[in-house]
Amino acid sequence: MARLLLTNIPILAFSLVWGSVFSLYFKNFFNYHRASSNSLIILLAGIMAVYAGYILVSLIFRKNTIHEISLPENYGEQYFSKKILFKITVVTLICYIGGGSAFFYVFSQVIGGVEYYFIDPGYVREMTVAVGQGEVANVPVIYRFAGFFISIGVLSNLFAGSLLARDPSKKMLAGLTLISNIFVSFANVQRYLFLMGVVLWMLAYIFTTLAYKRTDNSQILRSVISMGIMLGLFFYTFNYIIVHMRAFQRGDLESFFYESLYAYFVGNVSAFDMWLNNPNHHVTFTNGQAIFRDIFRYLAKFGIWESSEVRSMHQNFSTIGRYMSINTYTFVRVMYEDFQIVGVLLFSFIWGGMAKYSVIRFFEKPNYINLFFVELMTLSLLMSFYSFYFRNIAGPVFLLLVLAVIQFNTGKKHHTQIAR
């Protein structure tokens, strides 16, 4: 039973998220806008389609290696050996901390000094967004290199989680990797990078443990629950710090903190309805431009698509309460915006099916790409309350390419050693 639960973490995370969202939504602690029945039906249709896709793939691949007790010979050892994982973790962690340090140094110059991180964090956050959108001129080129190394370094969480699963004696290195997310996220003044790093770390530990420890899964489940509680408190504390940094001048800071958490997690349902039924804005269907925004962005760079028609990474804000506006609309918005209810049903179904297939693929052939694949699908379902994760596909594609290079070289060295 414990193994069944843990190997279905993608849909379990999805279920816990939406169970919590609807429970809190109907409590309506902050008197936010109530969604119409039509909007709720569209949202529920998308959720049910995810389940349908996940269940169908589960039925198709009933016979697989997920629940087998005996392991095939040399089961992924060329990638998940303790020695190899240790080396890759150290290298990627250096990239992560080095990139974060470079970003912090350069961005301190852009904003006028390190002190602005402490005296006006809201301004720092606005500047990170402006620089990211290309609205600030003369940004030092090292800023781009810093972002490049941070992107590579975030994978240290994946390797550290796997290393801890394979070698519990490396707690210090695994813990350092986890803590490094705080520094890098502080430099960027954002929560999402921290959340992504923690989730990659946690899921790598879980799936690597399940792949190589086929018995005594009840103990693994207890460890995962304990770790989940610890990381939950970790995220709560970090979120508390970030919100207080961004809005430290408010007189109602404590109540604002809890409302911001509520809005971040639950307000997207209200925002989706506000967008769908806005009398001053007619929803125009965009035939793929919302879901595949990054593809159209690169087409525009090559002159194939009109750059003015590329949709912004940041969506418009909707006012959901007296003092609260947000610009995230759950995963269904971009699907509905592109292809109406057909898009919601079709893409949600494919998404759910791919999530289950990612689990099966990892246990059939454990390697870095397949581990990242299952983590990516789980993360996307976890963040479904917020937005559709694959709307910004360039980041995941870049990380997959980095992992492909690491995996190729790791496997090549391993085969060379065997030949000798």
Image (spheres, rainbow, N blue to C red):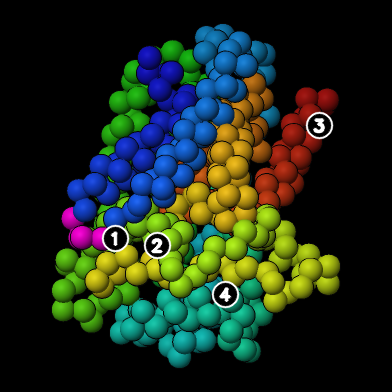
Displayed quadrant of residue 298: bottom right
Q: Secondary structure at mark 3?
A: helix
On the image, numbered disc 1 is attached to which residue? 33
Q: Is the C terminus in the top left, top right, bottom left or bottom right quadrant?
A: top right
Q: Is the N terminus in the top left, top right, bottom left or bottom right quadrant?
A: top left
From the viewer's perspective, tell me whether residue 81 is left or right of residue 257: right
On the image, numbered disc 2 is attached to which residue? 274
Q: Position of residue 284 (x, y in %)?
A: 60, 63
Image point 49% across, 70% down: which residue?
281
**Residue 132: image tag:** 4
Residues at circles 1 and 4 in contact by the CB criterion of under 8 Å: no
Q: CA distance from mark 1 to mark 4?
A: 31 Å
Comparing labels 3 and 4, the label whose residue is closer to the camera: 4
Name the kind of residue labelled 3 in the image. Thr
Image point 79% across, 29% down: which residue?
415
From the viewer's perspective, tell me whether residue 269 is left or right of residue 103: left
Q: Position of residue 105 (x, y in %)?
A: 50, 79
* Vertical relation: 3 (above or below) 329: above
On the image, numbered disc 3 is attached to which residue? 416
Q: Secondary structure at mark 4?
A: helix
Q: Tell which of 189 and 8 is nearer to you.
A: 8
Between discs 2 and 4, the one toward the N terminus: 4
Between discs 2 and 1, the one toward the N terminus: 1
Residues at circles 2 and 1 in contact by the CB criterion of under 8 Å: yes
Q: CA distance from mark 3 to mark 1?
A: 62 Å
Q: Tell which of 362 and 25 is nearer to you.
A: 25
Q: CA distance from mark 3 to mark 4?
A: 43 Å
Q: CA distance from mark 2 to mark 4?
A: 27 Å
Q: Is residue 241 visible?
A: no
